[in-house]
Image (spheres, rainbow, N blue to C red):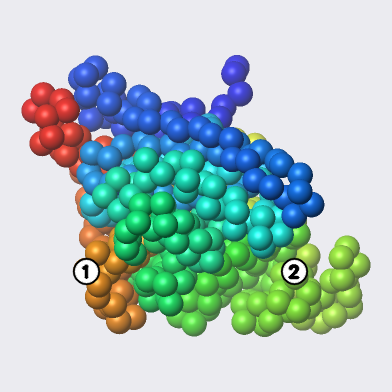
């Protein structure tokens, strides 16, 4: 069997939705490939005078519903297949939450930790120059992703304005507040997800204090989600980062974990230095050390993968004990695992819905950039809640009406909305 790639995994889920929606071959062809795949080598001069080139990508999957939208990741393993899959998922995601964007994604094959601040700035500006004709507030609106941040977005906006001799605050989102950013952007992915978890729990008449939560990944989204859930009375029983994690059946205080992670660089920092742990102290506190593989299989009510893709696969899906898998990360569950989880009666809230809070507040930032307004934190929060709950209800209705999983229902909702826009634009016969 050919080894799967992120894009072939996307196509597996897409195919189910296309079959379900009974699309014609003409309609299906519109979803087969991204509209455009742009590739360039970015050459920069290192601080030591040496010239070095980095492969860079911008994949534009669909702009049927509005300008292309999607983050730019800096990662040594960023490649065309991964960027293609993320662009396609973003197109579905923006359609599911009903915001007027399409889907795109960018990447540079680089480890940013190997670059000085000056080199990083040069590379970021080179990206904008390389893809300049394909970017713009009405064409394609980038954003941060893995290993990129507001400072990098600010350099990119500045470079775009320089090259186009324009004032373009709506060119890019995820910018610093002082340079046209939006309040609430830093917590948006977790905040949007939190609203959905609250809704799920309310609908099932469950008591948050009786629910145990495991979060794999303690980056921005995972750590922020841990705080929201902890403050709402949920019991966080396990947390991890790239170096491993801790499990305490009676509950963990994420504020304490964050304090030690800041000090030591690790979630396990309160108890362990490297691989050496204070076993006695862990016993006293009822804490165990766990790996990132073990954390997924712990007994809990809600499992939140908030780090890498493909962590729930055919090999471990049978050992997942959670009742709900809530995908805060992109693509954490493989199609094979999805089938096994469905058989076990596990509810999977898919990434295209669960983590759409980030792109939703990016849309709010774009609107603010175009209008010159600055929204209050309260307005961002209430609009985010409205958008996320409307999307959840549309997906839930589709799921119930058609007896579909939430993932298949979300894809159906997204594709139908994209198709409606394509028909309206005359790309396909109505």
Give percent across and percent down for residue 235. Answer: 55, 75
Q: Are marks 1 and 2 in contact (CB under 8 Å)?
A: no
The residue depicted at 47 percent of the width and 48 percent of the height is 128
Question: Which is more foreground, mark 1 or mark 2?
Answer: 1
Which image quarter holds the C terminus?
Answer: top left
Which image quarter holds the N terminus?
Answer: top right
Upstream in sequence: badge 1 or badge 2: 2
Tell how many labels.
2
Q: Residues within 10 Å of mark 1 (few under 14, many from 20)?
A: few
The residue depicted at 62 percent of the width and 70 percent of the height is 237
The residue depicted at 43 percent of the width and 77 percent of the height is 178
Question: Does residue 426 appear in this view?
Answer: yes
Q: Residues within 10 Å of mark 2 (few under 14, many from 20)?
A: many
Give percent across and percent down for residue 293. Answer: 70, 50
Give percent across and percent down for residue 3. Answer: 61, 23
In the rendered image, which residue does mark 1 sit on? Answer: 371
Q: Which mark, by number, is residue 266? A: 2
The residue depicted at 67 percent of the width and 55 percent of the height is 119
């Amino acid at each position: 069997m050919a080894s799967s790639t992120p894009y072939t995994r996307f196509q597996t889920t897409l195919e189910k939705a296309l079959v379900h929606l009974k699309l014609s071959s003409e309609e299906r062809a519109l979803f087969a490939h991204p509209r455009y795949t742009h590739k360039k080598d970015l050459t920069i001069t290192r601080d030591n005078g040496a010239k070095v080139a980095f492969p860079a990508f911008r994949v534009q999957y669909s702009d049927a519903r509005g300008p292309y939208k999607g983050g730019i990741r800096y990662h040594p393993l960023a490649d065309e297949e991964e960027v293609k899959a993320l662009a396609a998922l973003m197109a579905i995601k923006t359609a599911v939450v009903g915001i007027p964007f399409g889907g795109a994604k960018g990447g540079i094959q680089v480890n940013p930790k190997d670059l000085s601040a000056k080199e990083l700035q040069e590379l970021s500006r080179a990206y904008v120059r390389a893809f300049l004709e394909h970017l713009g507030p009405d064409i394609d609106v980038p954003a941060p992703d893995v290993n990129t941040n507001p400072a990098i977005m600010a350099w990119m906006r500045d470079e775009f304005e320089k090259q186009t001799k324009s004032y373009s605050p709506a060119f890019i989102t995820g910018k610093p507040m002082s340079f046209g950013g939006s309040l609430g952007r830093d917590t948006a992915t977790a905040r949007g997800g939190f609203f959905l978890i609250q809704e799920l729990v309310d609908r099932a008449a469950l008591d948050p204090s009786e629910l145990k939560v495991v979060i794999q990944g303690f980056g921005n989204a995972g750590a922020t989600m841990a705080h929201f859930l902890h403050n709402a009375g949920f019991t966080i029983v396990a947390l991890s980062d790239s170096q491993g994690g801790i499990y305490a059946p009676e509950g963990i205080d994420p504020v304490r974990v964050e304090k030690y992670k800041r000090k030591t660089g690790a979630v396990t920092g309160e108890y362990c230095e490297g691989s050496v742990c204070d076993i006695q102290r862990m016993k006293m506190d009822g804490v165990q050390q766990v790996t990132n593989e073990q954390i997924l299989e712990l007994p809990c009510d809600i499992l939140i993968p908030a780090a890498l893709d493909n962590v729930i696969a055919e090999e471990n899906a049978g050992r997942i004990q959670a009742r709900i898998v809530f995908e805060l990360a992109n693509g954490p569950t493989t199609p094979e695992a999805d089938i096994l989880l469905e058989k076990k009666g596990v509810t999977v809230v898919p990434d295209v819905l669960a983590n759409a809070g980030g792109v939703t507040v990016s849309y709010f930032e774009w609107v603010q950039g175009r209008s010159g307004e600055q929204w209050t934190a309260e307005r961002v929060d209430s609009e985010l809640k409205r958008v996320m709950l409307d999307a959840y209800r549309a997906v839930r209705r589709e799921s119930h009406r058609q007896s579909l999983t939430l993932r298949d229902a979300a894809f159906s909702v997204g594709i139908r909305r994209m198709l409606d826009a394509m028909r309206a634009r005359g790309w396909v016969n109505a």
